Amino acid sequence: MTSLEFRTQVARPSQAERDRALDVLREGVGSGQLSHDTFIRRMELVLTAKSRAELATVVADLQTYGRVARAVLRGVARVSAFKVRVRRTWETEQLPGLRLPGPGSARLVIGRQTGSDLRLGDASVSRLHAELRVEPEGWVLQDLGSSNGTFVNGQRVVGAVLVRPGDQVRFGRLAFHLIAQ
């Protein structure tokens, strides 16, 4: 008699199991547990996994959150974002105001150079730093090739950008908030 051989076959993961593992990875990226590069590497492992054990290994170190925990985390994120908005508003209100030129003004040249319409005596401000002018679509702030940059609401100005009252502008290290006439 011959002995019967029983071959055990490893169950390959189904597409639904792979999708659940990918969801866990996405949640890990969203919660900051994984970097983008790690996510890409692990995604490849999920897609090429030959067993359920391999899938489990790929996501074993990631915490998954239930519906209630996700709702709490979203609430904490909203409260934190509110705190950041309040701090930015407070800091903006503490800045000195810069009045936007009126409709009769052609332009306002900002710089360190004598003869500038707005002369700023800080070493971080270029001699001819920026120009603020009224155009049909509104006030336009243009960087004039300054070495330390012109910024509107934290974003560096490349060329010209529309500004409005309430915007925060920075020339080098000097910051202002814009006020309408």
Image (cartoon, rainbow, N blue to C red):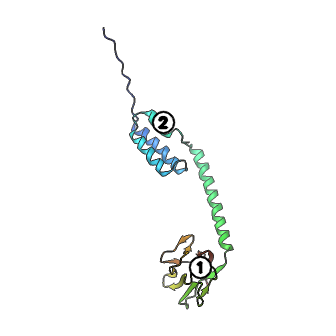
State the image quarter where residue 96 is shown.
bottom right
Residue at figure coordinates x 44%, y 35% from the top left: 54
Q: Residue 15 got which mark?
A: none
Q: How many marks?
A: 2
Crowd class of label 1 (few under 14; some 14 to 19; many from 20; radius 10 Å): many
Tell me where residue 169 appears, x and y as whole percent: 59, 75
Q: Secondary structure at mark 2?
A: helix
Q: Residue at x 60, y 45 (%)?
A: 69
Q: Is residue 51 above or below residue 47?
A: above
Q: Amino acid at mark 2?
A: Ala
Q: Quadrant of the N terminus?
A: top left
Of tags 1 and 2, the one toward the viewer is 1
- Residue 110 position, x and y percent, is 57, 84
Residue nearer the viewer, 38 or 82: 38
Whichever of labels 1 and 2 marks the residue nearer the N terminus, that label is: 2
3D distance between C-alphas at marks 1 and 2:
57 Å
Q: Amino acid at mark 1?
A: Val
Q: In the rendered image of this protein, does residue 115 appear above or below residue 86? A: below
**Quarter of the image with the C terminus in it:** bottom right
Q: Residue drawn 59% across and 79% down? A: 125
Residue highlighted by disc 1? 125
Q: Residue furthest left?
A: 1
Q: Say which mark, if any, is on residue 56.
A: 2
The reply to whether the C-beta atoms of the residues labelled 1 and 2 are less than 8 Å apart is no
Secondary element under disc 1, as helix, strand or loop, is loop
Spot occupied by residue 103 in the image (x, y as percentages of width and height): 55, 89
- Asked whether, in this view, residue 93 is left or right of residue 159, the answer is right
Q: Residue at x 39, y 33 (%)?
A: 12
Q: Nearer the viewer, residue 92 or 15?
A: 92
Q: In the figure, residue 150 lies in which quadrant?
A: bottom right
Q: Residue furthest top?
A: 1
Which residue occupies the extreme front position in the image? 123
